[in-house]
Amino acid sequence: MKQLVTATLCVAIVALFMITCPSQAQTLVVYANGPTLNQVIMGDTLANGARAHTVYQLVSLDTTYLMDGTVTMNTDLTIVGVPNGTTGRPPCIQPDVLPDNSIPGTLFSLNGKKTKGTFKNLYLLGLAINNTANGGGVAIQVAGDSVRLEVDNVVFDEWQTFAIGYNGNYDKFFVTNSKFRNMVHPNQWYIGEALRNTWPGEVATDSVVFKFNTFFCLNGYASAPVSKYLVKYFDFSHNSVIYTFKNPLFIFNVTNAKINDNIWYGTYAGGVDETENPWWDNLWYPDTTYGVVSLQPLDSAKIRVFAPLLPPKANGVIDTAAEQLRVIEAKNNVHFWPSALTGLWTAWNDTASNKIITPTWMNARTTTMFADNTTWPGLTESGNQGVDPGFGATIPGVMTQATNNLEAWFKLCRAGLLTNTYWGYQKTQVGVAVNWVPPWPLPEAADMKYTNTALKTGGTDGRPIGDPYWFNGTSGGPTSVEESDLIPDAFALLPAYPNPFNPNTSLRFTLKESGVVSLKVYNIVGQVVATIINNEHWSAGVHTLTVDLSHAASGIYLGVLEQGTNRAIQKLVLLK
């Protein structure tokens, strides 16, 4: 007993030391007048090789922080800037130029499984000190599995490939109050994207949450979890998406999603030309109409993960039982294409041999899905409207401005003549002064304040539709997306659907905390007739499972969910 007590005490002392050890608890303040930022962070280790700090505070506002290599991290990492208290200007990070005149491609790579990356109050500029960009440039790459990335109040400017790319399985992304601007590759019109599930191969995704952001002049997607594999949760709400050349979303197979309170202005401006139609912008079905919001029925591989108890069906066959489990809402969105863009489309198709298919709010298949309440009872849409927000003149002026205008780039692209050409809005030009910093406030700030009064309180929550930042600053939205946005605040077993049923029904349950769970079906005399979950560890969140009672007789049954001391019951009626 004495040895056991001693060992326990030693463990407690070691744990206490690890918690209170200054090298683990302190934040390292970093100035921009020393070594490059990656050198500081990668060299910040203890004698045993462990990280000395995981939080780095950037305080310099009078010059930029340079990076001549990638910060590759296998542990938690927090980079937080201290913005100017009056103007809100954040510290800026940009690539250096290497001795061989090359430019680092990736700033940050998060490689550790189940680690957390936090980036807050920063300006991440893709242009190096010589005013050129790496054509494969990525600001943040998430390579580890089950990584949680939080990004708040960050400007991503001039990233020609991705702002955030990922190839780790079941990663989580929470992006708020951020600005993605002028993400244009000079000769590849499908890259220049904000978030992309990408090579060496698409992966399953836990959560993607984008709230209170602006995407302004992007070649490709604002958010592309791709959905070839499972995306457990997708929330794209209160964002302003203004001019994308290709489709702003790539979410065809999402199963649980919100697309609410967004402004879609001039998106999908490049349309779909004859070489791209029908497969370049699709997954499993050859759609020939294209929309801002485009969904498709689930493929068989997705169903095996999303609803594993359902009997398999071949690809191309709509599995009604699986489709009935999808929950997707699209509410109070505003979509609008300015006349300079619609006129360009008309004029191009009048004369060009390579005509384009122009986009709509929802493509034909998606419109049908939302209207079919039998197959897709969980798909709901309301309050979406095609009206002009009334931006200031320079916003519609992107089409025809004196330099870098979208009309000229469209014509070069669709004629196959792109070489080294850009489009965008008041593109950042890096100065030669040692103390150069990007212009602040962002030059679009004034004209982003739209004039359509009805939209200023038109959100489902009473906020301005789109990104409220342009009216209220960061006080217009949350400073971060908390886990509570995804995790319910109650343990519950929800009513089955359908009920009565024969022989399958679906049960949805919510877990406030992760833990060991059982879900069983009992007959009225207390005998177990089906074990759906047998004391397995499940994560907190919303879960849906199929109950198959094909082996049971007609009658009344009870579904019972248990987790620790919690128990919830729902009545099930089987009618054969």
Image: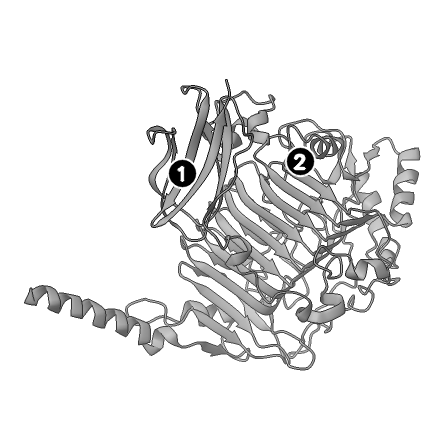
Q: CA distance from mark 2 to mark 1?
A: 34 Å
Determine whether 62 is above or below 363 in the image.
Answer: below
Q: Residue 292's quadrant in the figure?
A: top right
Q: Which label was assigned to residue 421?
A: none
- Is 575 in front, or is 264? 575
Point out residue 274 in the picture as x, y percentages from the top left corner.
78, 30
Residue denoted by label 2: 295
In this orientation, does residue 250 appear? no
Does residue 279 show up?
Answer: yes
Q: Residue at x 62, y 28 (%)?
A: 284
Establish if 368 lies above or below 87: above
Q: Nearer the viewer, residue 198 or 467?
A: 467
- Residue topped by disc 1: 560
Type of amino acid at the residue the image marks with label 1: Val
Q: Residue at point 45% right, 59% down?
A: 116
Q: Position of residue 568 (x, y in %)?
A: 43, 44
Q: Earlier in the sequence, mark 2 or mark 1?
A: 2
Q: Is residue 60 left or right of residue 445?
A: left
Look at the numbered disc 2 and give the secondary structure of its residue.
loop
Q: Residues within 10 Å of mark 1 (few under 14, many from 20)?
A: some
* Amino acid at pointer 2: Leu
Indicate left or right for 405 with 233 as reference.
right
Q: Residue at x 81, y 56 (%)?
A: 404
Crowding at dot 2, Cα within 10 Å, few <14 / some 14-19 / many 20+, comes out as: many
Q: What secondary structure is found at the residue carrying circle 1?
A: strand
